[in-house]
């Protein structure tokens, strides 16, 4: 299949031009741009190399309206000129793929990285506006999935949830988990050999379970605490940060708040740590997910302390590349930290196994799977 034979439209109501926050969509767009005439349509802060960008600035509910209604004539006119073979749509992009399929016979790919209704319902306020929006979203996705030639999601539980919610067969949904670039996320040589550094990467807010880590740290002896540095990377909700600082003030360990850093700085700064934590609680929205940061921890060769919840158990293995602890069991968290601090051999074994698993879960393999599905079974080699 020649690249110049195919034109692809990729629609998203979120900015997918950078890897942070929209990891899979960014890698899909970049890889498609290497192979096809690829047009990325939606809010964008920069152009993805190899693609043509068609951007607008609206976001949130307004951005969804712009994508599906206000700018719909623009997308149809663009399709008249370029005749897309494939329309690749992410969550809340409803009318453009339907119109382009009807008018031009484009193959429609619907890629749902989260449940379009259940996850927002779980984590957002239960306002009248949100209720109306989510009801409209359910109706829209129900309609879209009827037109979709291919539906992709990232986990078996999410596949089951989508199939049940929208009345489609699980056999019609392809499962492609998230991944990592192991050539970018490579193990680092630790600079500080004296202290033990624990790292967390992700949003720092209430439902992420970070307070669980600090409660575990506070159960360690003062002598052990004095050896520990905690490095936090990610956007912060101020009220929650105050709660974490209050917990941290009880302990003798140090805490560094880095905020959101450029993605290209993550491998070096995070890789210089001794272990990573993923303390997610057992919320339904997390149980159907495929946490991108877990794959990055793995590729960096970091031993991981993770809560014993479904997404972690799908990716990690207890005592092989991670230590599992029960959610909210602060004593078990404390003991896991103590084990890694005191047992260098265990850290090394977990880290080596983690790196091996990170390589096995590369974005190159993930995108290859998507290309095979989208290309109707025709294999397309991604350039090294």
Image (cartoon, rainbow, N blue to C red):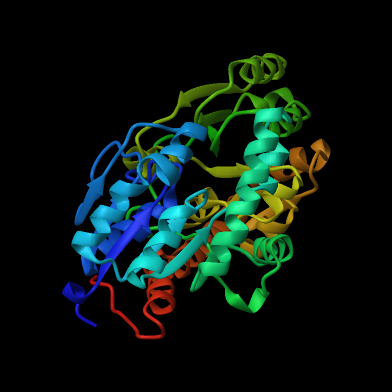
Q: Residue at x 51, y 69 (%)?
A: 148
- Residue 336 visible in the displayed image: yes
Residue closest to the eye, 296 or 347 = 296
Q: Horizontal and vertical percent for residue 181?
A: 37, 58
Q: Residue at x 74, y 30 (%)?
A: 126
Picture quarter with the N terminus: bottom left
Q: Residue at x 20, y 76 (%)?
A: 5
Looking at the image, the residue that sits furthest to the left is 4
Residue 7 in the figure: left or right of residue 114: left
Question: For residue 225, which quarter of the picture?
Answer: top right
Where is 365 relative to 191, above or below? below
The tally of labels here is 0
Q: Residue at x 53, y 64 (%)?
A: 177
Q: Horizontal and vertical percent for residue 119?
A: 67, 45
Residue closest to the eye, 384 or 88 = 88
Question: For residue 267, which quarter of the picture?
Answer: top left
Where is 88 relative to 92, above or below? below
Residue closest to the eye, 122 or 141 = 141
Q: Horizontal and vertical percent for residue 142?
A: 62, 59
Residue 31 in the figure: left or right of residue 199: left
- Residue 186 visible in the displayed image: no
Picture quarter with the C terminus: bottom left
Q: Horizontal and vertical percent for residue 312?
A: 66, 56
Residue 190 in the figure: left or right of residue 73: right
């Amino acid at each position: 299949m020649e690249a110049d034979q195919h034109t692809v439209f990729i629609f998203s109501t979120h900015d997918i031009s950078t890897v942070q926050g929209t990891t899979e969509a960014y890698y899909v767009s970049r890889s498609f741009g290497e192979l096809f005439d690829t047009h990325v349509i939606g809010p964008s802060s920069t152009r993805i190399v190899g693609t043509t960008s068609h951007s607008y600035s609206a976001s949130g509910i307004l951005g969804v309206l712009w994508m599906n209604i206000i700018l719909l004539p623009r997308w149809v006119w663009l399709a008249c000129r370029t005749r897309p073979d494939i329309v690749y749509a992410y969550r809340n992009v409803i009318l453009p793929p339907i119109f382009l399929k009807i008018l031009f016979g484009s193959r429609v790919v619907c890629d749902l990285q989260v449940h379009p209704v259940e996850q927002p319902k779980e984590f957002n306020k239960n306002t009248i506006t949100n209720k109306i929006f989510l009801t409209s979203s359910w109706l829209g996705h129900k309609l879209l999935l009827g037109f979709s030639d291919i539906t992709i999601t990232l986990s078996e539980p999410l596949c089951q949830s989508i199939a049940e919610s929208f009345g489609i067969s699980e056999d019609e949904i392809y499962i492609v988990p998230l991944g990592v670039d192991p050539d970018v996320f490579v193990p680092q040589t630790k600079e500080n050999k004296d202290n033990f550094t624990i790292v967390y990467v992700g949003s720092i807010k209430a439902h992420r379970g970070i307070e669980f880590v600090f409660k575990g740290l506070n159960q360690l002896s003062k002598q052990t605490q004095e050896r520990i540095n905690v490095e936090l990377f990610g956007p912060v909700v101020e009220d929650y940060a105050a709660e974490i600082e209050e917990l941290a003030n009880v302990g003798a360990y140090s805490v560094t708040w880095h905020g959101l850093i450029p993605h290209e700085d993550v491998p070096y700064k995070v890789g210089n740590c001794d272990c990573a934590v993923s303390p997610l609680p057992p919320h339904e929205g997390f149980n159907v997910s495929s946490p991108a940061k877990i794959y990055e921890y793995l590729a960096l060769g970091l031993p991981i302390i993770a809560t014993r919840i479904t997404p972690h158990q799908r990716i990690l293995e207890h005592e092989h590349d991670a230590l599992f602890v029960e959610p909210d069991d602060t004593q078990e968290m404390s003991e896991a930290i103590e084990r890694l601090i005191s047992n260098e051999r265990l850290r090394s074994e977990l880290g080596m196994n983690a790196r091996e698993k990170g390589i096995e879960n590369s974005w190159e393999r993930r995108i290859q799977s998507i290309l095979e599905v989208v290309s109707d079974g025709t294999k397309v080699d991604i350039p090294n």
